[in-house]
């Protein structure tokens, strides 16, 4: 369904397990950033009322997930650390259209950018739900994986709906190819996308 060209090496889970506080802190901030992205979509594209409605829902859901991850940290006697930068997201952002192209093309790229992040997060959550040794975290990530898949489908759906003359399949393939070219340097850190 996701079409990712390069899967995460399953050994990434072994790296993650060495410092659960680190991955949970990074995950919490990923949820917060996803909520911020939804708000940004509202601000940039208020003319699409159905998009606004969905971004409100996604923002609320992402902040709920932030709270769930924070609760998971507290349950384990851990504290939320400081926010980290997400080099993967910054690298991916370099690919989206900025300033140039039609408003429609910029909207499509923004939706595909968000879909790509949700797709990779979904893939990582699936891996954690199957491979992490902590049974509670397996169940936790299984439930979140389903939500990420739904968000991915929402963003792709809006890109298709408002594409106009843009070939979405071609543009999505370009995103997938670009993302695959980045993945050689990721999957080696104790972060959700690292």
Image (tube, rainbow, N blue to C red):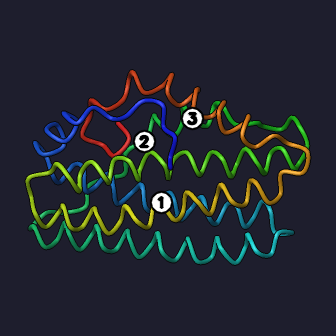
In this figure, which residue is indicated by the disc labeled 2?
85
Question: Residues at badges 3 and 1 in contact (C-beta under 8 Å)?
Answer: no
Residue 92 circle label: 3
Residue 73 percent across, percent down from the top left: 19, 66
Q: Residue at point 18% right, 61% down?
A: 138
In the shown orientation, is residue 133 left or right of residue 45? left
In the shown orientation, is residue 99 left or right of residue 146? right
Residue 22 percent across, percent down from the top left: 22, 49
Front position in the image: 110 or 43: 110
In this figure, which residue is indicated by the disc labeled 1?
149
Front position in the image: 51 or 27: 51
Secondary structure beneath label 3: helix
Q: Earlier in the sequence, mark 3 or mark 1?
A: 3
Q: Distance between the residues labelled 3 and 1?
A: 19 Å
Question: Residues at badges 2 and 1 in contact (C-beta under 8 Å)?
Answer: no
Residue 103 percent across, percent down from the top left: 88, 49
Front position in the image: 124 or 88: 124
């Amino acid at each position: 369904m996701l079409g990712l060209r390069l899967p995460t090496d399953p050994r990434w889970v072994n790296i993650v397990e060495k410092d659960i506080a680190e991955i949970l802190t990074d995950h919490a901030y990923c949820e917060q950033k996803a909520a911020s992205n939804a708000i940004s979509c509202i601000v940039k594209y208020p003319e699409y009322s159905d998009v606004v409605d969905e971004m409100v829902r996604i923002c609320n859901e992402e902040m709920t997930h932030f709270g769930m991850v924070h609760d998971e940290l507290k349950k384990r006697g851990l504290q939320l650390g400081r926010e980290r930068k997400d080099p993967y997201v910054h690298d991916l952002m370099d690919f989206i259209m900025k300033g140039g192209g039609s408003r429609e093309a910029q909207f499509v790229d923004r939706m595909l950018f968000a879909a790509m992040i949700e797709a990779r997060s979904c893939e990582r959550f699936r891996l954690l739900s199957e491979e992490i040794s902590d049974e509670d975290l397996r169940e936790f990530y299984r439930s979140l994986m389903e939500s990420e898949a739904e968000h991915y489908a929402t963003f792709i759906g809006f890109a298709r709906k408002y594409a106009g003359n843009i070939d979405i399949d071609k543009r999505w393939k370009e995103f997938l190819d670009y993302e695959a070219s980045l993945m050689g340097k990721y999957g080696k850190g104790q972060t959700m996308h690292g």
